[in-house]
Image (cartoon, rainbow, N blue to C red):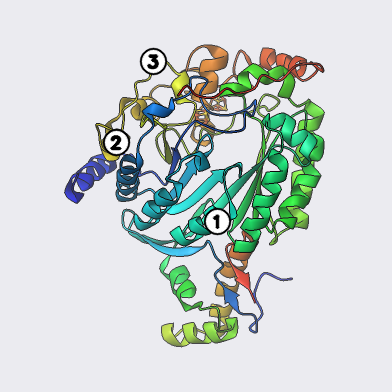
Amino acid sequence: MDGSEVRDWRAEGKANGIPAPIAMLAELTHRCPLSCPYCSNPVELAQKSLELDTSDWVRVFQQAAELGVLQLHLSGGEPAARRDLVDLVKAARDAGLYTNLITSGIGLTERRLQELDMAGLDHIQLSLQGTDADMADRIGGYKGGFQRKMQVAAWIKDIGFPLTLNAVVHRQNLHQLPRAIEMALEMNARRIEVAIVQFHGWAMSNRDALMPTKEQAQEASRVVAEARDRLKGQLVLDYVPADYHADYPKRCMGGWGTTGLNVAPDGEVLPCHAAQTIKSLKFDNVRNKSLSEIWYRGSAFNAYRGDDWMQEPCRSCDRKKLDFGGCRCQAMALAGDPNATDPVCVKSPLHAELQKRAVAFSHHDNAELTYRQQPPA
Amino acid sequence: MTDGLSPDVIPVIPRGVRLHWDHVREKWVLLAPERAVALDPIGHAIMTEIDGARSFGTITTALADKYGAPHEQVAADAGEFLRGLMNRRILEVA
Ligand code: SF4
Ligand code: SF4
């Protein structure tokens, strides 16, 4: 693909009011040594033999930069499970992308981190399943994982990589949130992302084990607000509050097909990580189309752009430019219709029932965790 | 601390933050963890003066000279801008 072709797509996009994307999430693999019960990977995992190879990814990174992507998130599964990770980071940097590695830390040795440093890696996001080995290893389903993660955190600090700690919290570990914030400071992290688990993918089968109580959700908001105030200029806190207990839905990214895109391990390009749950959507693949063509012309991207697709009550709601009607994948999962109002919204006819169910889920004290599985070879 | 910056501090662009010419949107951006901050010409002028060695006072004097603007105004505006970046951990001071 030459430069002029990209510019043509962009002109066409501009004429149709479609902005260029800012961020791309590259799911390098669905393989992962951990098996967190809230993994956002699809329940049907992409098999290893179908993963894009190094040269495919390098081409995709170059196309992403030409398309206007600024930030690249290398994710998975566990991206460190890719042997070519260092080469991929280097290629991403050469393409001019800001390169962020989202990792559990497992699979990163000191040597490999040094190589990533040399390759120009800009930033690391380290996930945290719990603040002690008991909790973290049980939630991650991987014995010894916590200890290795702490070792990796120490190497990251030595090398001086900018770090964000990603704490996913839920009913079983929400009481550890204050300690997670302390740990971020000890690790010299500049940011912590506190995300109350969102119910997509594998988490859907764990709603009774993971749903926070309403009181916990409120306490988490209080802890975050207090820490933001106290640690201003020292630690940035980004927060994803509990969804089912809220009155308005989360805004769908920056709006479907306006800000970001995902490339799955096998090259399918998705408007969001959960989009494959909407069976009516058809996804293009980077193996046979350019990223620009997919972004501007792809039917999955155009499906929920703008608001022509909206039904009532969203259609005439004055919040529709704020939240875009909430999450399409959640509308699919909970209302059975991807065009419906996200049932988290008070204006949805399903809202009251959902809140009742959320309370019920949050009181299933003995619910067992269903762990994520491994993709087929 | 107030909203501004003291003239003696030395602003430093930390590791993981860099200036980038966005060829698609045709403007300068500051790339940082999970953030892309679009810079207007003034923001860009301030950022390019930061070299990790000169003090904030030296920088604002240079900017005031260069653009023929009153020094106090430049120091107030640049101080507020940089303080905002510091609160987001996009800038450090030595
Ligand atoms: S549709 Fe839902 S899961 Fe997908 S990006 Fe929007 S909010 Fe997120
Ligand atoms: S009715 Fe639709 S647009 Fe309005 S607040 Fe609810 S989800 Fe958002």
- Percent coordinates x, y for residue A139 in the rendering: 71, 30
In the picture, residue A371 is in which quadrant?
top right
Residue name at image x 44 percent, y 38 percent: A28
What crowding class fits label 1: few (fewer than 14 Cα within 10 Å), some (14-19), or many (20 or more)?
Answer: few
Relative side of A79 to A155, left or right: left
Q: Quick check: B57 above or below A241? A: below
Q: Which residue is mark 1?
A: A111
- Expressed as whole percent of the image width and height from the top left, the position of residue A144 reads 71, 38
Residue A296 has which mark? Answer: 2
- In what element is the residue under mark 1? helix
Q: Which residue is mark 3?
A: A280
Same chain under badges 3 and 2? The reply is yes
Amino acid identity at mark 1: Arg
Sequence order check, earlier mark of 1 and 3: 1
Q: Quadrant of the N terminus of chain A?
A: top left
Q: Which mark is residue A314?
A: none
Q: Nearer the viewer, residue A230 or A71?
A: A71
Instruction: Calculate the distance from the C-alpha at mark 1 to the C-alpha at mark 3.
Output: 45 Å
- Which mark sits nearer the N-terminus, 3 or 2? 3
Looking at the picture, tell me which residue is in the foreground, B85 or A99. A99
Are the two marked residues, 1 and 3, in contact with CB atoms closer than 8 angstroms?
no
